[in-house]
Image: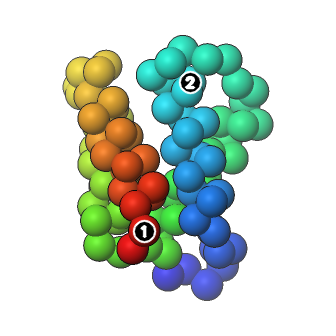
Amino acid sequence: MNIDSPFVPLDGLRHAVTTIRRGLVDHQVFSAAEWDTAVVTIARAHDQVGGSTRRHLYEVFASTLPGAPAHALLQPLEALGADLDCPH
């Protein structure tokens, strides 16, 4: 973990995933600040989590690469959200 990166609580990660899902999947409008916070939170959390949560984060990132279909983000985002809702 990067020691310069502040700790991301699980609820913060859940909120970030929900924000991104609402914007990209449900087409809800949110501010640039909310978007920036959500993206930074997910990036920071990547350094702090392991196991299936980290794998789902990789899949979310991969689904946003150039050339990926526009709908590619839905499944990995849903899987990440479901993973975060499960007690570990």
* Residue 32 position within the rendered picture, expressed as x and y whole percent measured from the top left: 72, 30
Give neighbour class at mark 2: few <14, some 14-19, many 20+ (Cα, 10 Å).
some
Who's the residue at 31% across and 54% down the image?
56
Who's the residue at 37% across and 40% down the image?
77
Quadrant of the rendered image containing residue 58: bottom left
Label 2, secondary structure: give it.
helix
Who's the residue at 36% across and 39% down the image?
78
Number of marks in the rendered image? 2
Q: Are marks 2 and 1 in contact (CB under 8 Å)?
A: no
**Which residue corresponds to mark 2?**
23
Label 1, secondary structure: give it.
loop
Q: Quadrant of the C terminus?
A: bottom left
* Residue 42 position within the rendered picture, expressed as x and y whole percent measured from the top left: 53, 54
Which labelled disc corresponds to residue 37? none
* Residue 31 position within the rendered picture, expressed as x and y whole percent measured from the top left: 75, 27
Looking at the image, residue 22 lies above or below residue 36: above
**Which residue corresponds to mark 1?**
87
For the residue pair 75 and 37, the one nearer the viewer reads as 75
Who's the residue at 65% across and 58% down the image?
12
For the residue pair 54 and 36, the one nearer the viewer reads as 54
* Residue 36 position within the rendered picture, expressed as x and y whole percent measured from the top left: 67, 41
Looking at the image, residue 9 lies above or below residue 82: below
Tell whether 19 sits left or right of 33: left
Looking at the image, residue 9 lies above or below residue 24: below
Q: Amino acid at mark 2?
A: Gly
State whether residue 56 appears in this view. Answer: yes
Q: Amino acid at mark 1?
A: Pro
State whether residue 61 appears in this view. Answer: no
Q: CA distance from mark 2 to mark 1?
A: 26 Å
Q: Residue furthest front?
A: 87
